Amino acid sequence: MLQPHSVSNREQVIDTMIELTRLSSLRRTIVAGNGSLDLYLALRRRGFMRVATTATCRIPKGQHAVGLITGQNSIQAIEAALAEISQYLNASAAIAVLIDSREGCFSLRIRAKLEQMGFRIEAGARCQEGLVLSAVRQGFAPMEIAA
């Protein structure tokens, strides 16, 4: 059985991610991380029908406007999820990443990775489960390798 405080902690993270990314029911959203299924189901219950996980979305074509990474991930898992999710995000996408409270000292490394991927950090909010960092991609288009 779930503890009442754990449910409210998860809801607090979801609320924070929604607010920081300005998520609306019209925007396509992709979720990743080891808590992605729980986040997917929670967003669907809240009426967000244009949400998918990296496992359920077949072709990464840059069609999503919002990316959310959640779960109790290590720094390496977050970096891998960022690399995976970036293929699904469009040129002006917003992203929110939950950095576990145990991994909080690595937020600078995550910031550097986001900036390397063309994101500009907008805000960070402290939650019970850690730090939610949000960023926006400003007209970023990956460069094609010339043959």
Image (cartoon, grey):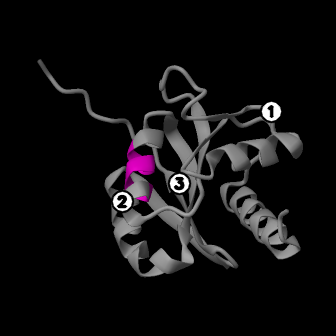
Circle 3: residue type? Val
Residues shaded magenta: 78-83
Residue at image location 67% in from the left, 43% down from the top:
37
Circle 2: residue type? Gln
Q: Name the residue under label 2.
A: 76
Q: How crowded is mark 1: few (under 14 residues within 10 Å), some or many (20 or more)?
A: some
Residue 35 highlighted magenta (yes or no)? no
Gap between marks 2 and 3 measured at Cα = 21 Å
Tag of residue 136? 3
Q: In which quarter of the image is residue 20?
A: bottom right
Residue 131 lies, with reference to residue 141, above or below; the image says below
Q: Are marks 3 and 1 in contact (CB under 8 Å)?
A: no
Between 106 and 147, the residue placed more toward the observer is: 106
Mark nearest the camera among 2 and 3 is: 2
Q: Mark 1 points at which residue?
A: 49
Q: What element carries label 2?
A: helix
Residue at image location 39% in from the left, 65% down from the top:
75
Gap between marks 3 and 1 measured at Cα = 22 Å
Mark nearest the camera among 3 and 1 is: 1
